Amino acid sequence: MSPYSFKFAIFLIATFVMTAGASDAKTLKNRKTSTAQARATPGPAYSTRAEAMHFADDLASRRDLDPQWVRDAIGQSRYLPTVALLMQPPAKTFVKNWRVYRSRFIDPVRIEAGARFWLANQATLERAEKEYGVPAEIIVGIIGVETIYGRDTGSFRVMDALTTLAFDFPASHPRAAERSEFFKGELEQFLTLQSRLDADPMTPRGSYAGAMGMPQFMPSSRIKYAVDFDGDGKVDLWDSPADVIGSVASYFKAFNWQPGMPTHYPVSFDTSRLDMDALMAPDILPTFSVASFTAKGAVLEGPALQHQGPLALVELLNGPDAPSYVAGTENFYAITRYNWSSYYAMAVIELGREVATRVRSVTP
């Protein structure tokens, strides 16, 4: 599950290159290629890093793992400059744009792939919805946004990515120390899992952040929420659509998905009594009752006026144009627990709806 901000910045760079003049684009391409090649070359193994080896010994002791096995796994891991680069914070000039972000995910390729995935796994999706209360379109939306239904699950060795981010998280990041500790925890979870499964820790590949499989679960999420939904005695997030579907549904149930509740409602504003500062203060955390929401100038209609539970005002920036707004429910907030971005959540919702529409159009 990747940070929206960096991916979107990369998208804008790519757009600039495509629209630049031919000679400028060629020069920039050559420069970027040589830089990328240098950054793609793995750095030294972590066996030479005293702090990494100390961590390995401490981990083995705390988790009752084979000390040499842990030292070998961490020691074989290589520093990946590309991974460190991808975690750099975006430039200060970065401006979010929901319409551009949306266009990256709501496209014919994902919609058609999603329809095929849905039709091939319809019975499993129905079973997951019955057992966990999570609609098929949300599950399908997640898998489509994350990996285009398994088409792109990542090419980095998970050990390399996690070890790089545990010990060499970019110091320029405003939360570098906190994030480094997070990835040390994920490295610990991953090695514990691989030891329990008697599996080679150097084999799995995933994203630059160490997320794995079709649903891009981090190791801690794999341990907490993944389920053996096909009943074959193992959890396979790469090649078992049933396990992937069940695991995504399990994740959302754990984060308080409310069966039958919409994710959001349309909202407009009564400018004569609008208190935008108060409405925006809780960010995307649902806080307002319908009465307190509308008292601050938000205008709801139809079913939204009968909503039971808290609401949040969700703002989606559109670059230089006016922002888009929706009234987000607890289920909208639940989607942001998968990736902490309202843009991501809305992309999941809208992709799922588009795929559902496509499935209905080809189903008798």
Image (cartoon, grey):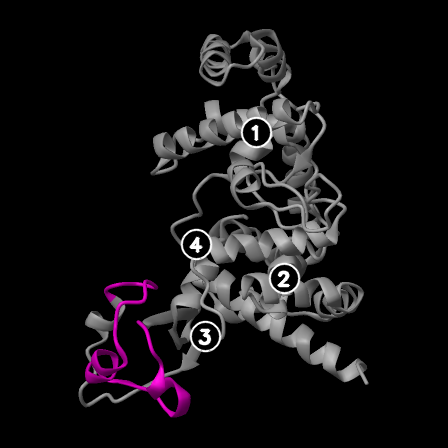
Earlier in the chain: of badge 1 and badge 2, it is: 2
Amino acid carrying label 3: it is: Met
Q: What is the secondary structure assignment of the residue under circle 4?
A: loop
Residue 293 placement: quadrant: bottom left
Residue linked to disc 2: 128
Amino acid carrying label 1: it is: Phe
Earlier in the chain: of badge 4 and badge 3, it is: 3
Give the residue drawn at x 60%, y 66%: 129
Earlier in the chain: of badge 2 and badge 4, it is: 2
Q: Give me the C-alpha separation between circle 1 and circle 4.
A: 22 Å
Residue linked to disc 4: 340
Q: Nearer the viewer, residue 192 or 155?
A: 192
Q: Give me the C-alpha separation between circle 1 and circle 2.
A: 26 Å
Residue 101 pos. (x, y %): 54, 64
> Which of labels 3 and 1 is toward the front?
3
Question: CB atoms at circles 1 and 2 under 8 Å apart?
Answer: no
Residue 101 within the segment the image draws in magenta: no
Q: Which range of residues does the magenta coloring cover? A: 281-310
Q: Give me the C-alpha separation between circle 2 and circle 4.
A: 24 Å
Earlier in the chain: of badge 3 and badge 1, it is: 1
Residue 3 pos. (x, y %): 49, 49
Residue 288 within the segment the image draws in magenta: yes
Amino acid carrying label 4: it is: Trp
Q: Local crowd at mark 4 within 10 Å, few (<14), some, or many (≥20)?
A: some
Horizontal placement of 165 versus 242: left or right?
Answer: left
Residue 182 placement: quadrant: top left
Q: Local crowd at mark 2 within 10 Å, few (<14), some, or many (≥20)?
A: many
Q: Give me the C-alpha separation between circle 2 and circle 3.
A: 17 Å
Question: CB atoms at circles 1 and 4 under 8 Å apart?
Answer: no
Question: CB atoms at circles 2 and 4 under 8 Å apart?
Answer: no
